[in-house]
Amino acid sequence: MEKGYKDQALGRSRGRLATKIHMVCDARGPPMRFALTGPQASDGPQAIPLLEGIETVALIADIG
């Protein structure tokens, strides 16, 4: 990580600074919660904190 970007959701991806967006939406599509991480972060660990406290009957997940 470069100096000055340590505590921000920035990281290097193919030589450029990038950010990854992890998001939870309701059934109609509007975002409910989101988290920003650097591009090297995986999707799985971000899902649990984003889904905590949300009651649902079904879940549809996708990784891009």
Image (spheres, rainbow, N blue to C red):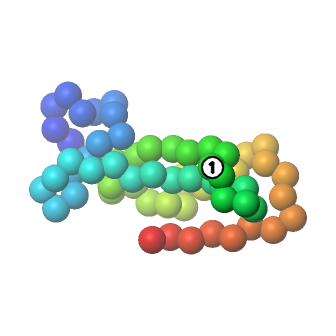
Residue at coordinates 62% horizontally, 44% vertically from top-left? Answer: 33
Looking at this view, is 7 or 58 the one in front?
58
Q: Mark 1: which secondary structure?
A: strand
Residue 49 in view (yes/no): no
Residue at coordinates 56% horizontally, 71% vertically from top-left? Answer: 62
User: Hey, which quadrant is residue 60 in on the image?
Assistant: bottom right
Query: Is residue 36 left or right of 62 when viewed as pictured?
Result: left
The residue most toward the left is: 15
**Whole-percent x, y for residue 46 in the image:** 54, 52
Looking at this view, is 28 or 55 the one in front?
28
User: Hey, which quadrant is residue 53 in on the image?
Assistant: top right
Residue at coordinates 16% horizontally, 38% vertically from top-left? Answer: 2
Placement of the N terminus among the 4 image quadrants: top left
Q: Say if 32 sits above or below 59 in the image.
A: above
**Whole-percent x, y for residue 26 in the image:** 72, 56
Query: Is residue 10 left or right of 35 when viewed as pictured?
Result: left
Looking at this view, is 2 or 25 the one in front?
25
Question: Can you identify the residue that label 1 sits on?
Answer: 31
Q: Residues within 10 Å of mark 1 (few under 14, many from 20)?
A: few
Q: Amino acid at mark 1?
A: Pro
Q: Say if 60 sits above or below 17 in the image.
A: below
Placement of the C terminus among the 4 image quadrants: bottom left
Residue at coordinates 67% horizontally, 46% vertically from top-left? Answer: 32
**Whole-percent x, y for residue 11 in the image:** 26, 47
